[in-house]
Structures are given as C-alpha cells and as structure tokens.
Image: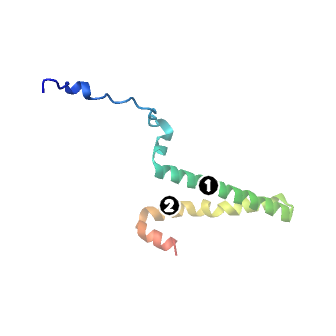
C-alpha cells in the first residue's frame, strides 16, 4: 500500500462545457421560455392571420360583386355591430352569473 498514488492524482478534472448554455430570456418575451406559451402564441398568430385574410377577402368580394363602396362600408359595420352592442351587456352577464352556466348556455 505504500506504492499507492494519492486519490487526487488518479481523479481526472471535469472537462469544460463544450456548448454555452443560453441565458434565460428576460423582459417582454420571457414567457416564450415555456413550450405551452410558444404553442399558444403560434396558434393565436395563425388564427389571427386567418381572420384578417378572411375579412380582407370578404371585403374584396363585396366590392367586386357590387362595385359600390357604400356596400363595403355596410359589410364592415355589420361585422362589428354585434360586438359593439352586445359587448357591454355580455360583460355584465359574465360578472353576475356562474362561469360554468355561461359556458354551457353559450355553447348550445
């Protein structure tokens, strides 16, 4: 046992890391560190792109079929009137009633 080397001489030091670990994002985009948040953001982005394309195509079609700018204005106005008139009322309903009941009634 007298010939045995000290333990420190036989242990190899750890190799330095080969790739730098990215620092976590800070600021406004730090929520995108989470996979579910990225997935939600991507789905929301694609859905909004589709909605804008549909609205643009519908406005173009109305103008091409009628040739009148007033009909295009009516189309846009009627598209947003339900939200304008029902938004405040629906907010009051949402504040006063059970969420589960509201979800069941509105999904019928």
Give the x, y percent position of residue 70: 81, 59
Q: Is residue 45 above or below residue 96?
A: above
Separation of marks 1 and 2 at Cα, in angstroms: 27 Å
Residue pushed farthest bottom?
A: 108
Count residues near mark 2 (Cα–Cα under 10 Å), then give few for <14, some for 14-19, many for 20+.
few
Q: Is residue 50 left or right of residue 71?
A: left
> Of helix, strand and loop, which one carries label 2?
helix
Residue at x 68% of width, y 62% of height: 79
Question: Residue 100 occupies which quadrant of the picture?
Answer: bottom left
Residue on which disc 2 sits: 91
Circles 1 and 2: CB distance less than 8 Å? Answer: no
Q: Is residue 6 visible?
A: yes
Quarter of the picture containing the N terminus is top left
Q: Is residue 108 left or right of residue 78?
A: left
Which of the two residues, 71 or 53, is positioned nearer the viewer here? 53
Question: Residue 3 occupies which quadrant of the picture?
Answer: top left
Residue on which disc 1 sits: 46
Give the x, y percent position of residue 95: 44, 61
Give the x, y percent position of residue 61: 80, 62
Residue at x 61% of width, y 57% of height: 47
Q: Is residue 7 left or right of residue 20?
A: left
Count residues near mark 1 (Cα–Cα under 10 Å), then give few for <14, some for 14-19, many for 20+.
few
């Amino acid at each position: 046992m007298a010939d045995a080397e000290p333990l420190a001489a036989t242990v190899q030091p750890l190799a330095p890391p080969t790739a730098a670990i990215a620092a976590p994002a800070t600021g406004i985009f730090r929520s995108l560190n989470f996979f579910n948040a990225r997935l939600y953001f991507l789905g929301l982005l694609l859905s909004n792109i589709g909605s804008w394309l549909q609205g643009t195509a519908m406005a173009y079609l109305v103008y091409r079929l009628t040739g009148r700018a007033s009909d295009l204005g009516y189309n846009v106005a009627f598209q947003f009137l339900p939200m304008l008139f029902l938004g405040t009322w629906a907010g009051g309903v949402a504040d006063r009633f059970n969420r589960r009941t509201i979800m069941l009634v509105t999904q019928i």
